[in-house]
Image (spheres, helix red, strand yellow):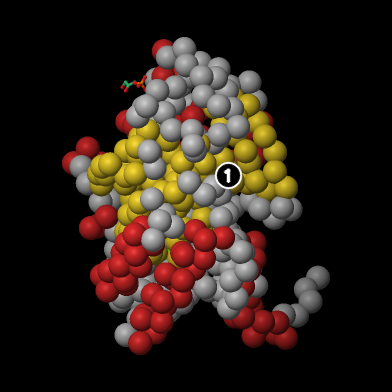
């Protein structure tokens, strides 16, 4: 019997503004998932938020893209949006871009990171959830976890990790994918994923000691502007990563976030800034609607049940990264509307900037 670990998330309304999910919406979601657990639709669940994104974490035995699991998440988001509307929360129903549910939530707005696997004797899994950024923000940390020996000591000293990993990379513009093996194709991989607004790591697969067709990491790659045709909010991504016993240790999975790397999506989805690793209680986006945040909740899963969990960045060990992120945030902010704080023009195409450019169109004159 395999276990499926599903993270399905959506921004269904913020309070206030785009800062945070209100407790009332979290309570509603918990109530709904509790009922679904009693009815046997899911085995277990955990509800949380990162900034203004409502995060449903569910364990079950129904596999990826399952209609009853996705339908459940969709209904929770719909009801939470209704409540958000009644309470006048900001951007109520923001990420629910289509009206009709037909089988699964792909292409409807919510972000999804799901993987089905054979449980090991002990199954540690980390759910990473980000706000005010985009799927490519996971490229650097996922690469470091599974391919960088300066991050993951196990790649060098544990024979079970020595053969490396297989990366599934998506070209989100051309809708194509490619599989690359590390360490031997590491330079090719970096050539792609360094361009994080276009090439994103979708999944990572093991190459020894674990079933090679079962992912060990998965990232949500939904792009909202491609569904909505315009900027309505950022594609704040989530990821699930399995750890230990033939995989990076828990500490190797968390280590990349000690470096608050620059990501896109801060303020109006239009700015670059550092990603700050924070505890769930600190995941409210205040300064210039940010800076971008990442939370990490660690789980132990046994027979499809969540037997324990921990808020992993709720730890002074990440204070230095948070302070560093503040310093970088300050430095970036002082550029105001200038690149590279503001995104390059090409990426601004999907924001509200083209409407400003339209106004000036008739005033451009030819020059020699
Ligand atoms: P595993 O071999 O179980 O992954 O243990 C390694 C470890 O945790 C060392 O820090
Ligand atoms: P969200 O995508 O988190 O809703 O943020 C939108 C935004 O424009 C914040 O400045
Ligand atoms: Mg929002
Ligand atoms: Mg958000």
Marks counted in the figure total 1
Give the secondary structure at mark 1. strand
Q: Residue at x 35, y 54 (%)?
A: 45
Q: Residue at x 69, y 55 (%)?
A: 173
Q: Looking at the rendering, which quadrant does residue 258 occupy?
A: top left
Q: Quadrant of the C terminus?
A: bottom right
Left or right, 47 with reference to 209 = left
Rendered position, 79 above or below 20: below
Left or right, 60 with reference to 322 = right
Q: Nearer the viewer, residue 261 or 96?
A: 96
Name the spot of residue 142 as percent of width and height, x first: 48, 38
Within 10 Å of the Cα at label 1, are there few (<14), some (14-19), or many (20+) other Cα atoms? many
Q: Residue at x 31, y 75 (%)?
A: 15
Name the spot of residue 99 as percent of width and height, x first: 58, 78
Q: Nearer the viewer, residue 318 or 245?
A: 245
Q: Farthest residue toward the left?
A: 316
Name the spot of residue 213 as percent of width and height, x first: 60, 32
Q: Looking at the rendering, which quadrant does residue 145 occupy?
A: top left
Rendered position, 71 above or below 175: below
Q: Nearer the viewer, residue 270 or 53?
A: 53
Q: Nearer the viewer, residue 144 or 305?
A: 305
Residue 8, visible in the rendered structure? yes
Q: Farthest residue toward the front?
A: 39
Residue occupied by mark 1: 202
Residue 319, visible in the rendered structure? no
Q: Is mark 1 within 8 Å of ligand 4?
A: no
Q: Residue at x 44, y 53 (%)?
A: 7
């Amino acid at each position: 019997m395999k276990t499926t670990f599903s993270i399905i998330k959506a921004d269904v309304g913020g309070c206030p503004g785009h800062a945070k999910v209100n407790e009332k919406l979290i309570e509603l979601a918990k109530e709904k998932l509790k009922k679904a657990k009693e009815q046997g639709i899911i085995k277990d669940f955990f509800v949380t938020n990162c900034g203004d994104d409502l995060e449903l974490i569910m364990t079950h035995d129904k596999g990826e893209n399952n209609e009853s699991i996705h339908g459940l998440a969709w209904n929770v988001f719909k009801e939470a949006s209704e409540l958000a509307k009644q309470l006048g929360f900001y951007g109520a129903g923001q990420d629910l871009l289509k009206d009709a549910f037909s089988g699964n939530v792909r292409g409807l707005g919510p972000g999804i990171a799901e993987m089905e696997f054979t449980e090991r004797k002990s199954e540690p899994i980390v759910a990473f959830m980000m706000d005010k950024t985009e799927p490519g923000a996971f490229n650097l940390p996922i690469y470091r976890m599974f391919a960088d020996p300066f991050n993951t000591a196990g790649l060098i000293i544990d024979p079970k990790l020595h053969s490396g990993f297989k990366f599934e990379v998506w070209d989100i513009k051309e809708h194509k994918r490619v599989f690359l093996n590390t360490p031997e194709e590491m330079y090719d991989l970096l050539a792609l994923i360094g361009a994080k607004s276009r090439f994103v790591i979708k999944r990572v697969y093991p190459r020894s000691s674990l079933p090679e067709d079962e992912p060990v990491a998965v990232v949500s790659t939904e792009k909202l502007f491609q569904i909505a045709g315009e900027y309505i909010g950022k594609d704040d991504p989530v990821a699930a990563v399995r750890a230990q016993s033939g995989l990076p240790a828990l500490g190797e999975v968390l280590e990349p976030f000690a470096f608050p790397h620059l990501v896109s999506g801060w303020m109006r989805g239009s700015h670059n800034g550092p990603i700050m690793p924070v505890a769930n209680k600190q995941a409210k986006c205040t300064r210039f609607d940010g800076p971008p945040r990442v939370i990490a909740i660690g789980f132990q899963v046994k027979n499809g049940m969540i037997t324990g969990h921990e808020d992993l960045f709720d730890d002074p060990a990440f204070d230095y990264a948070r302070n560093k992120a503040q310093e970088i945030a300050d430095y970036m902010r002082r550029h105001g509307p200038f690149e590279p704080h503001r995104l390059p023009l090409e990426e601004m195409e999907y924001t509200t900037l083209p409407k400003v450019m339209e106004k000036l169109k008739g005033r451009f004159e030819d020059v020699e």
